[in-house]
Image (cartoon, rainbow, N blue to C red):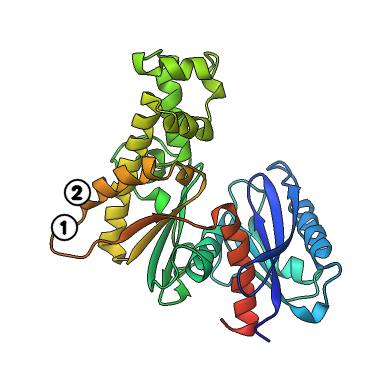
């Protein structure tokens, strides 16, 4: 019964988003709840998930639903059942699949949200037709997923794809993970906003337009605001996105040396900057690529499915686990 729908749930630091997803990747119905504060008990978040799933299943023929997929922003064990660590939620070695399976009428599968996203882009988005895919998600930090010949690569412990914590600058900027010089300290939304605030705070000559945009208050700076300013020709915003893009390209060249993918998919909120980010990334990638001039270069493209990729991928991975691809 490969034509059955599935339910996908995308859990992040701010929301629980759910949808009914067809085998063609189309979302037929949606529900959303705000995610409680980090300190909220894990059972409260589980209650929200169950509530969203029950609402989505209302009116559906139970036999038409294959499975329920959960995409979580955190470390998910290789068994696709346990959330080892979720930085924005209170889950620590949380047996999430077991807890939810007792309360839900369909098979439940858990996965990392970036794993779900790369699967969705391969099945329905920018990576269709490619056999070796690296996805990079640029948001507050950097996450990612790997897909090789139709299989999501999760690693020996389920935690592959955390490239944001590759060290690119020895003794560099301190990262929240505890180490220094991590890639996400130079090529993420946090890095973009941090550098913009430093320039506005110091009242740099190139920051004058931005200062007026935020009424002189660096706290008002956000990634989307910087991207909008860059599109409107703001010099500082364009330069900062170029810097972020350059670091993005450096990291991708390192990943190409390790994995040799045919395509890089760049998603997450920062990817909304499009070629303002990706053109500098492509230049830096070509400059840093090992064996440049004597090997094919991977394509670098923006993700197609946007914020829906995690939800769609979680649902389709769960469906494929029950009904086959």
Q: Which mark is residue 287?
A: 2
Q: Secondary structure at mark 2?
A: helix
Position in image of residue 255 (x %, y %): 31, 58
Q: Secondary structure at mark 1?
A: loop
Image quadrant occupied by the N terminus: bottom right
Q: Quadrant of the rendered structure where residue 292 is?
A: bottom left
Position in image of residue 293 (x %, y %): 13, 59
| Disc 1 target residue | 292
Q: Nearer the viewer, residue 20 or 154?
A: 20
Total label count? Answer: 2
Describe residue 313's horizontal placement relative to residue 207 as left or right: right
**How dense is the environment of label 2, judged by Cα within 10 Å: few (below 14), some, or many (20 and up)?**
some
Q: Is residue 112 visible?
A: yes
Q: Residue at 65% of width from left, 82% of height from top? A: 322
Using the image, determine if residue 21 lies above or below residue 35: below
Using the image, determine if residue 192 lies above or below residue 162: above
């Amino acid at each position: 019964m490969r034509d059955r729908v599935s339910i996908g749930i995308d859990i992040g630091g701010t929301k629980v988003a759910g949808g009914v997803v067809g085998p063609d990747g189309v979302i037929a119905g949606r529900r959303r709840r705000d995610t409680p504060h980090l300190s909220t008990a894990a059972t409260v978040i589980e209650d929200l998930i169950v509530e969203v799933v029950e609402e989505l299943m209302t009116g559906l023929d139970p036999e038409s639903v294959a499975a329920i997929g959960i995409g979580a922003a955190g470390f998910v064990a290789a068994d696709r059942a346990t959330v080892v660590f979720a930085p924005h939620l209170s889950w620590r070695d949380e047996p999430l699949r077991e807890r939810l399976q007792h309360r839900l009428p369909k098979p439940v599968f858990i996965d990392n949200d970036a794993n779900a996203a790369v699967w969705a882009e391969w099945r329905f988005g920018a990576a269709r037709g490619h056999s070796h895919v690296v996805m990079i998600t640029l948001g507050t930090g950097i996450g990612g997923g790997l897909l090789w010949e139709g299989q999501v690569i999760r690693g020996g412990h389920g935690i592959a794809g955390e490239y944001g914590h590759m060290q690119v600058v020895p003794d560099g900027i301190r990262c929240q993970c505890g180490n220094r010089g991590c890639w996400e300290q130079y090529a993420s939304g946090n890095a973009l906003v941090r550098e913009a605030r430093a320039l506005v705070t110091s009242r740099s000559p190139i920051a004058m337009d931005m200062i007026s945009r935020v009424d002189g208050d660096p706290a008002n700076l956000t990634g989307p605001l910087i991207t909008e300013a860059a599109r409107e020709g703001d010099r500082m915003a364009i330069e900062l996105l170029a810097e972020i893009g350059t670091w993005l390209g450096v990291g991708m060249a390192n990943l190409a040396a390790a994995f040799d993918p045919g395509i890089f998919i760049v998603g997450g909120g920062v990817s909304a900057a499009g070629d303002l980010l990706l053109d500098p990334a492509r230049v830096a990638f070509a400059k840093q690529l090992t064996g440049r001039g004597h090997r094919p270069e991977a394509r670098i493209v923006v993700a197609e499915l946007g914020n829906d990729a995690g939800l769609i991928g979680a649902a389709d991975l769960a469906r494929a686990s029950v009904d086959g691809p």
